[in-house]
Image (spheres, rainbow, N blue to C red):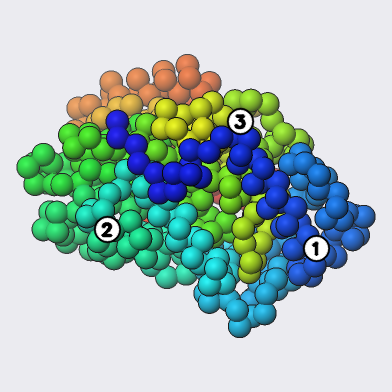
Amino acid sequence: MEVKYWEPHVETASKKAIEKIQLKRLKYMIDYVYRRSPFYGRRFRELGLHPTDVKSLEDIRKFPFTTKDDLRKHGYPHGGEFLCVPREEVVCWHMSSGTTGVPILGGYTRRDYDTWMNLAARSYVCAGVKPGDVIMNIYGYGLFTGGLGLHESAFLVGATVIPWGTGRTQALIKALIDFKATVMTGTPSYQYYIATLVKEMGIDVEKDLNLRVTIPGAEMWTEKMRQRIEEWLGLKIRGGGARDIYGATELCGPGAGQECVYEKGFHFWVDHFLLEVVDPKTGEPVGPSEEGEMVFTHLVKEATPIVRYRLGDITVLDEEPCECGRKAFPRCLRVRARVDDVIHFKGVKIMPSMIQEVLLKHKEILEYQVIVDKTKLPYDFVVKVEVPKPEQTPLLLKKLLSEFKNSLFIEPKIEIVDPGSLPRYEGKSKRMIIKEEEAK
């Protein structure tokens, strides 16, 4: 397995060396926001906190969490009380892709933007991208950070970019062949849809495609989905794979973390972001290998830095050294769900990733949708699945009911629907629909 580094002196540094960098940057950042951010200056003074309270990395726990509600209430528009530089020093704004409430903004000075591009380049190389690669970028362009975040950064590593964006999927597949694209970036749902079409069209992936690496991100996905993308696009034939990238508007966009060629979870770039994993209910740190909510603090940010931000993403942190040599950069074993997506059904905690793992074990399932109706007591829990042949239905139903009962301890209603009747996704998927009104 060939391992390459963008910044070898950083990526191969010892844990002690990186922790020294973290502490120096953390002290600077807490002092920076104390002086420059109206929001943090006020909040810290109200709580009797001062930058001199930071003497170790653990001292970050003395400081309060920042929430999405804080950003919506105090950070819009133009960064609001989170903006730490004169407005004219902000060279660009990006906005969360959420559809509810006031948008969440991320502002960038020139230095912030260059730092982001460097981290995205580090992520590209970590994933196995090389000079001369042709990258088909199918993330959306615009206020969403995905498309632009992985555009200019590709130039830094010596690659060529095709800025496709989303849509025109049949033409996109033709372009993958015509341009001999070797890398594809995009949401896992869209990559899965493309892989499904490639399979249905009977394309010879060994002869006609050149894809070696895909970089899915921006939403939850599972090992079963990875296996299908890799198989149906022929990635392993060329010694590559589908490798998870992590990012969020509030951090810097894509490039905050990246899965390496060993595909055992994404390395979080902790020289730029201090990472905590906490119990979503208590806010206390979880133990080693325990599931929890990701919390980050910017260590290198000028325009809109955030301290102890609760991302809402659920993961498990693995701090064991990776074979790739990035021993100081812990791995997040995939984002399993968002805090808001976790469902408690008849006393059982269910995550979207758990459902996907059960369903995608079965190759005959083309697509699925989950509908949870909380307006009824008890909740209605319906799983719709597409299969190509009606004769497969009775046996599949029996298998699925057994697997849901034995592995997740639930018995949902399962409906087999016609091929093509469920939606396909070019951006983030909406495979789980939750009706949120209070049950009477």
- Above or below for 192 versus 316: below
The residue carrying pointer 3 sits among few (fewer than 14), some (14 to 19) or many (20 or more) residues within 10 Å by Cα, namely some
Query: On the image, which quarter does residue 175 sit in?
Result: bottom left
Viewer-nearest of discs 2 and 3: 2
Q: Which residue is mark 1?
A: 34
Mark earlier in primary sequence (2, 3)? 2
Which mark, residue 278? Answer: none
Viewer-nearest of discs 3 and 1: 1
Left or right relative to 274: residue 267? left
Q: Amino acid at mark 2?
A: Ala
Q: Quadrant of the C terminus?
A: top right
Q: Is residue 347 visible?
A: yes
Mark 1 to mark 2: distance in Å?
41 Å
Q: Check whether the beta carbons of the residues at disc 3 and disc 1 lie within 8 A of each other.
A: no
Q: Secondary structure at mark 2?
A: loop
Mark 3 to mark 1: distance in Å?
32 Å
Q: Which residue is mark 2?
A: 159
Query: On the image, which quarter does residue 36 sit in?
Result: bottom right
Mark earlier in primary sequence (1, 2)? 1
The residue carrying pointer 2 sits among few (fewer than 14), some (14 to 19) or many (20 or more) residues within 10 Å by Cα, namely some
- Above or below for 4 versus 426: above
Q: Which residue is mark 3?
A: 291
